[in-house]
């Protein structure tokens, strides 16, 4: 099958099988950009409710730029990769305050924006401005590798360069927006990672991987993700309707979100076999005669891309007569004492939300 036939077949397949998604019905760069940032490292089914939430709260670029960061993070809560939310906000402020509220209308210009990489820039450029620049995501890598028999490592600079060259040769100059949507949708719905239904594939007759039995081995990705385990012992310190929280400021996971004071340990046993009477809390808290209890017998588990977090919680409840003393201690240790309503409104890691809900 020639390059032209490959492209034409995908363009014929797309309108018959495409999902009805709101960002596909517009050339508004704000809506397209917002959807692409949300969908980075995120499945459409998971990202769609967040897209609607953002559009409802921040219908324009100016609304997003003027919103407090806490509100952005709270709306993003549960989606993960929170640096995307912070970059989204920073980019919106730059565009509104320094670029007259306008998006760049070229791939090269879009690439200069904070949080916008080659894939996102290509998506916006082709969908909003019909610039013929090809997108490369996991779906596209998979379709191209299988159909054309490319066994280069997609995580290597050489591999990415070769795939990009091929992708830009294939893209329709007349309908680059439709072609980019088509090949990504084809990878998402038809040429899926595991057990694709090749018998129903409209381009199977020209597929190298199907012909030579390499459907399960292509694409090649030799990048190994090292996963680190971490063990958190959280102190849920509360008094009446008020709770001690801290804002995560270090360059670590969940930066900008709030959680509780914690100790990080080296072993799982150190956060599981806990004797509340032996907790290493400051004497200032011990002197307030707190009531201790374990939040759960089993630790909570939260999986991130490169980390597995195991967390146990210790409830520390104080008598309301000690509120002034607790507030003084919290302020001295760069914590905050917040009401239940404020706690609900703040952006929190999904792990903390699960604990509070249970």
Image (cartoon, rainbow, N blue to C red):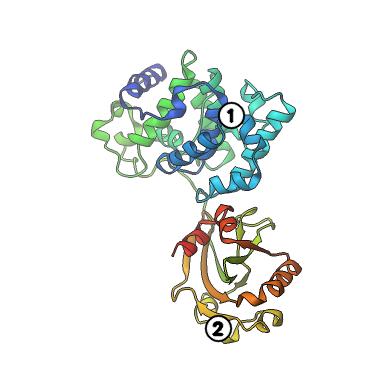
Residue 269 can be seen in this image: no
Which SS class for mark 2? helix
| Residue at figure coordinates x 64%, y 54% from the top left | 255
Which residue is nearer to you in this view: 180 or 303? 303
Q: In the rendered view, would you say 274 is above or below 248? A: below
- Residue that protrudes farthest toward the left in the picture: 199
Which residue is nearer to you in this view: 285 or 179? 285
Quadrant of the image for the C terminus? bottom left
Residue 315 can be seen in this image: yes
The residue wearing badge 1 is 60
Quadrant of the image for the N terminus? top left
- Rendered location of residue 113, percent (x, y): 67, 32
- Rendered location of residue 131, percent (x, y): 55, 18
| Residue at figure coordinates x 26%, y 37% from the top left | 197
**Disc nearer the start of the sequence (2/1):** 1
Q: In the rendered view, would you say 252 is above or below 242? A: above
Q: CA distance from mark 2 to mark 1?
A: 50 Å
Which SS class for mark 1? loop
The residue wearing badge 2 is 276
Mark 2: few/some/many CA within 10 Å (<14, 14-19, 20+): some
């Amino acid at each position: 099958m020639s390059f032209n036939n490959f492209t034409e077949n995908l363009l014929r397949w797309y309108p018959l099988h495409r999902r009805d998604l709101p960002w596909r019905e517009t050339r508004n760069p704000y809506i397209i950009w917002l959807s692409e940032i949300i969908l980075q490292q995120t499945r459409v089914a998971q990202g769609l409710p967040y897209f609607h939430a953002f559009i409802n709260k921040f219908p324009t670029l100016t609304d997003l730029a003027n919103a407090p960061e806490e509100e952005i993070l709270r709306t993003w809560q549960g989606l993960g990769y929170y640096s995307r939310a912070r970059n989204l906000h920073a980019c919106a402020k730059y565009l509104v305050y320094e670029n007259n509220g306008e998006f760049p209308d070229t791939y090269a210009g879009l690439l200069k924006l904070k949080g916008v990489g080659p894939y996102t820039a290509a998506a916006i450029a082709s969908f909003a401005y019909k610039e013929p620049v090809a997108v490369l995501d996991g779906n596209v890598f998979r379709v191209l590798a299988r159909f054309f028999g490319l066994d280069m490592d997609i995580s290597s600079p050489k591999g990415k360069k070769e795939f990009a060259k091929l992708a830009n040769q294939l893209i329709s100059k007349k309908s680059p927006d439709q072609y980019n949507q088509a090949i990504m949708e084809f990878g998402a719905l038809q040429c899926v990672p595991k057990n694709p239904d090749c018998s129903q594939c409209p381009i199977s007759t020209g597929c190298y991987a199907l012909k030579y039995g390499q459907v399960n081995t292509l694409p090649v990705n030799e990048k190994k993700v090292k996963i680190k385990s971490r063990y958190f012992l959280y102190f849920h310190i509360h008094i009446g309707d008020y709770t001690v929280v801290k804002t995560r400021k270090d360059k670590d996971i969940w930066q900008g979100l709030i959680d509780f004071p914690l100790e990080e340990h080296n072993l799982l046993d150190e956060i599981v076999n806990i004797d509340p009477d032996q907790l290493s809390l400051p004497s200032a808290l011990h002197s307030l005669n707190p009531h201790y209890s374990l939040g759960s017998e089993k630790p909570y588990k939260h999986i991130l891309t490169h980390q597995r977090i195991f967390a146990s919680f210790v409830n520390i409840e104080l008598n309301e007569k000690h509120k002034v003393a607790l507030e003084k201690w919290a302020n001295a240790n760069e914590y905050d004492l917040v009401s239940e309503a404020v706690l609900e409104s703040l952006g929190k890691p999904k792990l903390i939300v699960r604990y509070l809900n249970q």
